[in-house]
Image (cartoon, helix red, strand yellow):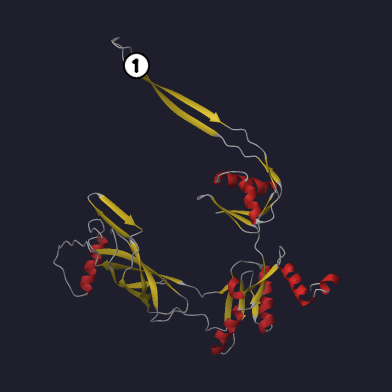
């Protein structure tokens, strides 16, 4: 309950709204998010499909059958399935054909007859798939069952040209997409035919789980939600199947009190990226970071004899090595309570990314950096 001072009681309705808003915006304030934004229904997800097919109609940019023999074998098998038999020992030169891997994503609750997009990627050494047509390709799931069939003309965003030993290329030519290029042939069994539904939070948190259960029971009554652990809960659906969709629509809109994320600094050591969230703060501290430079070189000297002295030119080299370590100055950083202030304070150091990573880790060890450091 929000207690107002005597001055606050004289502010009226607008003053009380302003005070409530200020309390809501304080650091560490509790936020309210929809249940659909912090959780998902277990088992209701996308499924990956994959298939192997042939792309035909290329303008001489297909696979070289000597280096990609599986393309020739695929063409022979396809022709035999179409009732065409080739003479024994016949060698095929298929410059307009390329073997390809076809991938697609089967959305949840997909039904037979729906169209989905597919991505076609060259498997052999084809130079380009531009202008090609994908032949009928079955798409299988992880269980080996066929869930869709893909076929159609490819859209390749790249372009390339060459001649006389020179070539130019824009974007990628070995992969393309077919919008609505596959038709769903088999549906994935849904989870709405059961009376008990499992709801999964996006992150494991016992406090968040308890608040979510309490919010659901306030909306639908006691016994609707049963927590299993810090991540999963069981939801009791209505016994009548036609009412379950409306129930889930209302369940997604339930507001759950959530706490703000912890201050965090994410460091990618491979790319040198440093990302901070808006809650990162630093205390006043002093930082001194020096750099060490080692130089190793070789100087070539030529000794030229005097004219008509019958001497010989002598070439010699002199190796040198030096170490430079400039004097490191101690820089005082002011305390920063917002992300903009943190950025301005760190920019005062003038350090590169590698040095900044080392400085942040040292500041965390000294207790000046108020954030968790995560290295990925």
Residue shown at 63% from the left, 57% from the top:
264
Q: Is residue 185 left or right of residue 308?
A: right
Q: Residues within 10 Å of mark 1 (few under 14, many from 20)?
A: few
Residue 164 is situated, as x and y percent measured from the top left of the image, at 22, 50
Instruction: Name the quadrant containing residue 12.
Output: bottom right
The foreground one among 91 and 54 is: 54
Instruction: Name the quadrant containing residue 213.
Output: bottom right
Residue 63 is situated, as x and y percent measured from the top left of the image, at 25, 60
Identify whether 290 is placed above or below 255.
above
The foreground one among 50 and 315 is: 315
Quadrant placement of the C terminus: bottom right
Instruction: Name the quadrant containing residue 244.
Output: bottom right
Residue 340 is situated, as x and y percent measured from the top left of the image, at 64, 55
Residue 315 is situated, as x and y percent measured from the top left of the image, at 36, 20
Q: Is residue 48 left or right of residue 248?
A: left
Quadrant placement of the N terminus: bottom right
Identify whether 282 is placed above or below 94.
above
Q: Is residue 89 left or right of residue 225?
A: left
Residue ID for mark 1: 304
Of all residues shown, which one is farthest toward the top? 309
Identify whether 325 is placed above or below 244.
above
- For label 1, the SS is loop
In this orientation, does residue 60 appear? yes
Of all residues shown, which one is farthest toward the right? 6
In this orientation, does residue 360 appear? no
Residue shown at 47% from the left, 72% from the top:
46
């Amino acid at each position: 309950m929000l207690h107002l001072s005597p001055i606050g009681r004289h502010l009226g309705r607008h003053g009380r709204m302003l005070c409530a808003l200020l309390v809501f915006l304080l650091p560490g304030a509790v936020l309210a998010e929809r249940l659909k934004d912090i959780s998902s229904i277990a088992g209701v997800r996308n499924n990956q499909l994959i298939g192997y097919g042939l792309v035909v109609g290329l303008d001489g940019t297909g696979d070289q059958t000597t280096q990609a023999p599986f393309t020739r074998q695929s063409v022979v098998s396809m022709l035999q399935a179409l009732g065409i038999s080739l003479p024994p020992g016949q060698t095929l030169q298929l410059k307009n054909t390329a073997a390809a891997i076809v991938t697609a994503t089967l959305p949840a609750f997909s039904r037979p007859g729906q169209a989905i997009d597919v991505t076609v990627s060259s498997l052999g050494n084809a130079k380009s798939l531009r202008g090609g047509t994908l032949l009928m390709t079955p798409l299988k799931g992880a269980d080996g069952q066929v869930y869709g069939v893909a076929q159609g003309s490819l859209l390749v965003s790249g372009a390339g040209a060459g001649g006389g030993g020179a070539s130019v290329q824009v974007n990628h030519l070995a992969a393309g997409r077919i919008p609505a290029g596959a038709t769903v042939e088999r549906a994935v069994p849904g989870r709405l035919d059961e009376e008990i539904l499992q709801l999964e939070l996006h992150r494991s948190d016992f406090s968040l789980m308890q608040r979510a259960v309490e919010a659901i029971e306030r909306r639908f009554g006691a016994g609707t939600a049963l927590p299993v652990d810090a991540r999963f809960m069981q939801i009791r659906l209505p016994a009548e199947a036609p009412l379950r969709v409306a129930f889930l629509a209302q369940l997604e809109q339930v507001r759950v009190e959530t706490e703000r994320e912890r201050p965090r600094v994410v460091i990618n050591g491979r790319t040198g990226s440093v990302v901070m969230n808006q809650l990162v703060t630093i205390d006043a501290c002093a930082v001194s970071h020096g750099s060490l430079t080692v130089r190793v070189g070789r100087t070539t000297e030529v000794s030229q004899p005097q004219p008509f002295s019958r001497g010989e030119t002598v070439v010699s080299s002199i190796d040198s090595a030096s170490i430079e370590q400039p004097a490191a100055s101690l820089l005082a950083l002011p305390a920063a309570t917002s992300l903009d202030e943190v950025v301005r304070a760190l920019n005062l150091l003038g350090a590169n990314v590698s040095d900044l990573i080392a400085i942040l880790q040292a500041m965390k060890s000294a207790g000046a950096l108020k954030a968790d450091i995560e290295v990925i």
